[in-house]
Amino acid sequence: MASSPPRPTHPGEAFGGTLRHAHWWQRPWVRYGALITLLALSGLVILALVREQTGTRGFLVGLGLAVLPVPLLLAAFRWLDRVEPGPWRNLLFSFAWGACAAALIAIVANSFATQWIATATADPAGADTLGATVIAPVVEESAKAAAVLLVFLFRRRDFTGILDGVVIAGVTATGFAFTENILYLGTAFGTDQLTGDSGMASVTAATFFVRIVMSPFAHPLFTVLTGIGFGIAALSTERQRIRRVLLPLGGLLLAMGMHALWNGSSTLGQYGFFAVYAAFMVPTFGLLTWLVVWTRQRELRTVRAELPAYAVAGWLTPAEPFALGSMRARRIARQYARRYGGRPAARAVAQYEASATSLAFLRHRGRRGRAGTDFVTRERELLLELWHRRGAARPALEHAARVTAPAVPVVAAPWPVHGAQGYPPRGYPPSGHLPYGHPYPAYDTNTYRP
């Protein structure tokens, strides 16, 4: 009977099994309850404000049109996050913060600042221009960056690199743009109702073309710059405090500058919008797309480079590092597990893949001196998660590794081959076992506990 890898000490045992009691306001359910209440109240207030400005019909039209790009944007950011998927609760919080809290802060602060400037200068037109090009970028990007900061501070284990910053920032900005588009499209529809315009020449059609067709990625593009700053800061050591502060601040300033340039394009003449769009927005979008895809491939290379150490120690099989470092092999493993074990098996394989990826990144940070003080505790937790799910994950990953392994050319041996007509000699494979392992074992959903 094969001996199993040594069971690591449970994290609670590392501190003598005693945990310090937290105050009532430090308990998770209190913090989650307060956060949910804050977001719910912000949502109700922003709903009332938008409906007041657009009317009921305008709100419904704006809602129906503004929701169109949301699934595509969320799917794109979720695709980027497939290497080490973050918890859904982080994405839900980010979207809700952008759509509710950040949008409410922006509407109230922008309106107050614009009215104050108009009163002080007695120039309403100039106040609107100044508010759009200076006040709005600062307020809106700061409000959206607050969500990234909160995840960075309080969900630090889930925020480990550039892609995490990109995903959190992009989802937050998607929620913000969703609410803002409802307001703009609903207001445009109300204008058309007053003037009697309809069809392609209407204000609603023009607003839809600019905000939904041409630039649905505008707000995510701005805020992703802030997310990249936080992501690079997450790769820094705890002793590099100045760098951990300056990098997010630099990303935020870049986001504000890009946002101000975009809003100010309307003041550059008839073709100012198209000039800024072609000269700045499209190249920046292309550059950031290349950066995040390159970072995604780099993370996969990190997985393939770091996990063999755990295979040598016996925690993983030799084929797993290769399979876990390939998105195609991961997908094949989940499909294989689902075919033979159903959804529980596929879910176990997905969780196994996520834990193994987190383990690889943790080891990578540890080798570079960037891991925190909880490195040993976190490593034990991840190893335990892998060990508990190995029964469902290992056969599926070994199958995926065989399917996706590069073909090896076979060359005829220069010496005589024993056996009739070149077949393997008698007795091969030994004891009737196949050289590539065993079939996927019977999967009992009654005994398996993910």
Image (spheres, rainbow, N blue to C red):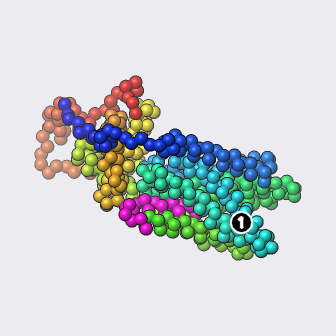
Q: Is residue 76 left or right of residue 111?
A: left
Q: Report the amino acid beneath label 1.
A: Ala
Q: Is residue 447 magenta?
A: no
Which residue is at 78% across, 51% downward?
52
Q: Is residue 222 left or right of residue 112?
A: left
Work out which quarter of the rendered image holds the N terminus and state it: top left
Query: x and y percent of residue 400 in the render?
Result: 35, 42
389 to 412, vertically: above or below: above
361 to 316, vertically: above or below: below
Which residue is at 14% across, 34% downward?
426
Q: Is residue 238 magenta?
A: yes
The residue lying toward the viewer, choosing from 214 and 184, is 184
Q: Secondary structure at mark 1?
A: helix
Looking at the image, can residue 360 be seen?
no
Which residue is at 27% across, 41% downward?
8
Query: x and y percent of residue 191 in the render?
Result: 82, 57
Tell me if mark 1 has few (under 14), some (14-19) or many (20+) residues whose alpha carbon lies within 10 angstroms of its own: some
The residue lying toward the viewer, choosing from 288 and 230, is 230
Q: Which residue is mark 1?
A: 113
Q: Is residue 93 left or right of residue 205?
A: left
Work out which quarter of the rendered image holds the C terminus and state it: top left
Query: x and y percent of residue 66 in the render?
Result: 68, 51
